[in-house]
């Protein structure tokens, strides 16, 4: 009981520190903190201490999850109502939803998807077009998810019957095709100009452009989307975790190890793979819809190959297959470039160097998936 | 139960099987002997729908197998234990067994699991252990137990003795014989002729993709289909490629 309380307190303190870090750490201070974290990761002694800390967290999963939820809800207050960082974190959570979806492809059945931004684009445009036609946000989102599910199913249908590498090429082509279609179908997408004036989300008379008035504090309008993304992220995590635990998840594990063996248990492997690809693509619809309404403006530049690669990088960096790791990886990768702005033109160089160093010391990602101890791939 | 007629298969220009005729009756144990490259594994893979079938027909309980995909053949009552066992090392013994029952209903799985574990008690004590940590013999037992989970009418086993110590081979073959006594037909592919003939009621010898000798076994006496009484070393020379 006492330990669980300590776990909760330390997690909450962690969130407060995170907020402080995001708002205040700049220049040399930031460099010192990042260097410190890398030392912990690299030095065996400090790494062991960190693992012991993590083990205590894992011994109290309920307290840890509850504290994480409370910490996330309180984060806008920890951030002193700073609209900029609340916005950055919302985008990071959207990115994390994409990483969870891509993890279904890459992590669960080992298919490398190089066109996830294409699916993200399909979701964003589908939702925007419906929303501009007057549909409420929830309906537009549901529509985007359905469209992405179908698109993913078609992608799978045309590629999973052959070898896994083929899927990478098909999706690479898919991502490029979607971008070209967006640029050229000007009557629908307004081409390179992008779509502006995407309606605000409104619910029971409260719109996402209004501040949240709680009496004591008045939270900036950005907070609306922060909470919306938080709910969507939690929902995605719960759904993806549930699928890992039931028969489907067991089949995923088996399929990764031995596809021929699995067909001899009576599973229609191609059909199962197509449905899995469709399921993973659905998350892109959710993320795309949130993204379009959060920014209020979408253009083909938001959905390039680089974006696909970034999602892929966050899954690999976070730890393929581990939902928690993938989420953390995505959030780090989308927040890091913002924090590295003080480096000016050297920003992307440092970003790349960070990735390389991390993968040298943790080749299976920050938080590797414990289920994969006995898998050799 | 299983009848194969003029069954031919090839990998591109390389012919692996030419015109095999073979049958397995319900509840019977039949072994298929032959040296490396004789086409034994190809035959099993083709029967399961995983290999290349070029011409000929295979019927299981009167149904033409060629129109059924792999997963449907499992539902018809065919099961296979692959060469090298093919267990899922990262999953627990229990999960491996559950996977084998994928095509059955849930209530059915629970019931079958009980019967299978009764047949292989050592698996019960290893229930939550990752299957990759079992010994070779235990993994082979697990592979057979998992094949039983789909309640097959016939099991095809590809080289169950491979890579096992002689005493473990004996345990595995005892288990196979017990499965057969419970009414499951068995098609056993083996190089370990002596052990295979101890379990089987009939045998076929395969050489370079064709059946060169066939016969029956009863109480250790081997009789060819032409009525000749054979010695084990005569069979051996048949599949080593010499004329008997």
Image (tube, coloured by chain):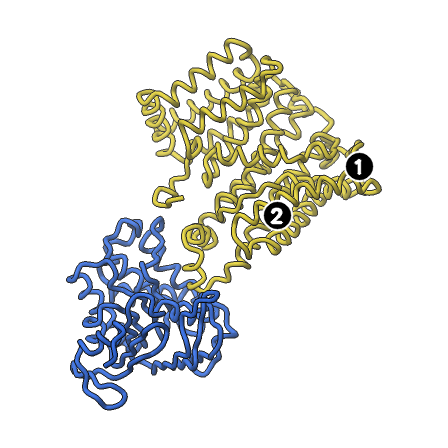
Chain colours: A yellow, B blue
Relative vertical location of residue A152 with respect to residue B153 in this rendering, above or below: above
Q: Tell me what residue is drawn at x 24 percent, y 84 percent.
A: B216
- Decide if residue B143 is on the left or right side of residue B122: right
Percent position (x, y) of residue A74? 55, 24
Q: Residues within 10 Å of mark 1 (few under 14, many from 20)?
A: some
Q: Residues within 10 Å of mark 2 (few under 14, many from 20)?
A: some
Same subunit, labels 1 and 2: the answer reads: yes
Q: Nearer the viewer, residue B125 or A61?
A: B125
Classify residue B148 by image quadrant.
bottom left
Q: Quadrant of the N terminus of chain A?
A: top left
SS of the residue under disc 2: helix
Q: Tell me what residue is drawn at x 61 percent, y 31 percent.
A: A227
Residue A191 numbered mark, or none: 1
- In this rendering, which labeled residue sits more in front, label 1 or label 2? 2
Q: Nearer the viewer, residue A314 or A247?
A: A314
Q: Which chain does the residue under circle 2 lie in?
A: A
Q: Which chain does the residue under circle 1 lie in?
A: A
Is residue A63 in view from this perspective? no
Identify the residue position indicated by label 2 in the image. Answer: A170
Q: Residue furthest right?
A: A187
Label 1, label 2: how far apart the Cα atoms are:
24 Å
Percent position (x, y) of residue A124? 70, 39
Is residue A118 in view from this perspective? yes
- Decide if residue B237 is on the left or right side of residue B61: left
Percent position (x, y) of residue A372? 39, 43
SS of the residue under disc 1: helix
Q: Tell me what residue is drawn at x 46 percent, y 79 percent.
A: B57
Percent position (x, y) of residue A220? 67, 21
């Amino acid at each position: 009981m006492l330990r669980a309380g300590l776990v909760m307190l330390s997690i909450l303190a962690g969130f407060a520190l995170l907020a402080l870090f995001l708002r205040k750490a700049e220049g040399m201070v930031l460099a010192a903190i990042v260097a410190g974290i890398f030392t912990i990761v690299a030095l065996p002694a400090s790494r062991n201490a960190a693992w012991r800390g993590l083990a205590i967290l894992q011994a109290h999963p309920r307290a840890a999850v509850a504290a994480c939820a409370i910490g996330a809800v309180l984060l806008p207050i920890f951030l002193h109502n700073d609209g900029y960082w609340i916005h950055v974190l919302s985008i990071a959570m959207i990115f994390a939803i994409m990483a969870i979806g891509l993890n279904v492809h890459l992590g669960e059945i080992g298919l490398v998807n190089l066109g996830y931004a294409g699916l993200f684009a399909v979701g964003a445009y589908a939702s925007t077009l419906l929303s501009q036609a007057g549909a409420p946000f929830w309906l537009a989102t549901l529509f985007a998810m359905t469209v992405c599910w179908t698109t993913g199913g078609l992608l799978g249908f045309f590629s999973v019957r052959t070898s896994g590498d083929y899927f990478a090429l098909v999706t690479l082509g898919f991502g490029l095709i979607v971008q070209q279609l967006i640029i050229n179908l000007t009557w629908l997408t307004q081409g390179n100009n992008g779509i502006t004036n995407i309606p605000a989300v409104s619910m029971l008379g409260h719109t996402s452009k209004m501040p949240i008035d709680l009496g004591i504090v008045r939270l900036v309008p950005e907070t609306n989307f922060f909470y919306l993304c938080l709910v969507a992220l939690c929902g995605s995590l719960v759904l993806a975790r549930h699928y890992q635990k039931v028969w489907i998840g067991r089949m995923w594990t088996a399929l990764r190890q031995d596809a021929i063996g699995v067909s001899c248990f009576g599973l229609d492997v191609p059909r199962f793979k197509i449905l899995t690809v469709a399921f993973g693509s659905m998350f892109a619809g959710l993320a795309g819809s949130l993204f379009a309404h959060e920014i209020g403006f979408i253009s083909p530049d938001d959905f390039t190959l680089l974006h696909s690669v970034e999602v892929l990088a966050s899954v690999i960096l976070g730890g393929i297959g581990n939902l928690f790791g993938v989420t953390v990886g995505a959030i780090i990768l989308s927040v890091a470039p913002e924090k590295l702005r003080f480096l000016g033109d050297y920003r992307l160089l440092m970003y790349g160097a960070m990735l390389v160093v991390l993968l040298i010391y943790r080749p299976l990602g920050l938080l590797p998936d414990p289920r994969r101890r006995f898998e050799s791939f | 139960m299983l009848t194969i007629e003029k069954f031919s298969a090839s990998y591109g220009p390389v012919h692996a099987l030419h015109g095999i005729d073979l049958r397995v009756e319900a509840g019977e144990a039949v072994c298929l002997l032959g040296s490396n490259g004789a086409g034994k594994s190809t035959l099993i893979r083709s029967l399961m729908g995983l290999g290349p079938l070029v011409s000929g027909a295979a019927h299981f309980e009167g149904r033409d197998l060629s129109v059924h995909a792999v997963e449907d053949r499992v539902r018809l009552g065919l099961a296979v234990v692959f060469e090298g066992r093919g267990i899922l090392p990262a999953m627990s013994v229990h999960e491996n067994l559950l996977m084998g029952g994928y095509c059955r209903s849930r209530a059915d799985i629970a019931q079958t699991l009980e019967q299978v574990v009764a047949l292989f008690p050592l698996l019960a004590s290893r229930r939550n252990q990752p299957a990759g940590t079992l010994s070779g013999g235990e993994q082979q037992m697990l592979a057979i137990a998992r094949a039983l989970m789909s309640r097959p009418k016939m099991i095809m086993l590809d080289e169950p003795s491979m890579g096992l110590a002689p005493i473990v081979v004996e345990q595995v073959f005892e288990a196979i014989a017990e499965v057969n006594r419970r009414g499951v037909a068995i098609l056993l592919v083996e190089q370990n002729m002596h052990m295979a003939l101890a379990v089987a009621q009939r045998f076929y010898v395969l050489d370079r993709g064709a059946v060169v000798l066939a016969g029956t076994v009863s109480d250790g006496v081997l009789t060819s289909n032409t009525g000749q009484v054979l010695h084990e070393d005569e069979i051996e020379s048949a599949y080593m490629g010499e004329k008997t």
